[in-house]
Image: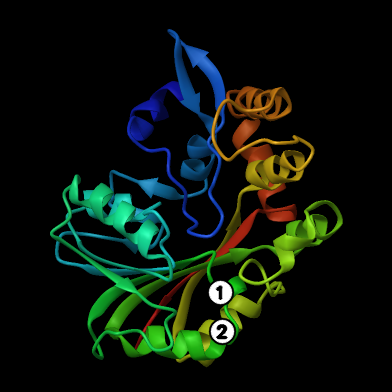
Amino acid sequence: MLNRLKHLFSSASESPSASEPMPVARGQRDEDEAIDIGLVDIHLSGWLQNDTGELIKGFAIGPQDTVLDIGCGEGGYALFSARQGAEIILADVDAEKLEIARRRLLAESARNVEILVTDANPIPLPDARVNRVVAMEVLEHVDDPAQFMTELVRVARPGALFLLTVPDEVIEGVQKHIAPPVYFQKPNHIRIFKRGELERLATEAGLIVESSTQYGFYHAVWWSLYWACENQPLSPPWHPLLERWSETWATLLALPAGPRIKKALDEVMPKSRAVVARKP
């Protein structure tokens, strides 16, 4: 299974989160080529569906689309949207990260790339400008999520699709015990979304929720172990503790029962929850 997925990640090592980079530690090796087990894991959770052009199941992107990636940081999964040939509008409060993201996306197949330095209050775009909105791991940083959502809905066309993700409340509860205090201080995580709250937020903003899922037990444990690794940057070489966890997870996924066990663990302690919704 891992070998079949390897080709999907030959040029991908970025994060779906602007505010919190996703580590892609190495797992099992085949013919001396390391596998990014973190990317394999999220692919198995429905992300990065190259065959169908879906960033996540139910959220397809094509050359005809205009994507607003709000809180995009250095680009992350905006690269996937660019590779589908879409027009991309990158928005973030950090101008330096936006410029990095812009250069990365221009090297891909994006129809056009625009950057906006903004805190989304308001978003400097006209009404009904985009038909895809991506807000991943952003809402937990926002002072007023309802107002934030109102702006996202305003700039979206009728029929536009929204992809919203937030950290799950269970792993955030774990982080309260082990993460440094700054983890829950502005501009980092200033709220924990209870299960069902993201769906309610989307509905109250006038959206129709089309799907809701959870994913990322692997990354939930990775981040829990990360805090034990002193002076570990968010880049390799990784601490042996993190390497061993990645190898263990790669071994599990290679077993016949691996995907079933992963699914059960993702449901109990996911890293994040994701909602796909549509503007009427």
Which residue is disc 2 drawn over? 145
Location of residue 262 (image quadrant): top right
Q: Which mark is residue 139?
A: 1
**Secondary structure category for the residue under label 1:** helix
- Residue 6: x %, y % from top left: 40, 26
Position above or below: 250 against 61 = above
- Residue 43: x %, y % from top left: 46, 43
Position above or below: 246 against 103 = above
Mark 2 Cα shell of 10 Å, populated few (<14), some (14-19), many (≥20):
some
- Residue 173: x %, y % from top left: 81, 61
- Residue 1 shows in the view: no
Q: Amino acid at mark 2?
A: Pro
The answer to whether marks 1 and 2 mark residues whose Cβ atoms lie closer than 8 Å is yes
Residue drawn at point x = 83 percent, y = 51 percent: 178
Camera-side residue: 256 or 43?
A: 43
Q: Amino acid at mark 1?
A: Leu
Colouring style: rainbow
Q: Is residue 168 left or right of residue 65?
A: right
Which residue, as the protein is rendered here, is positioned at the far front? Answer: 96
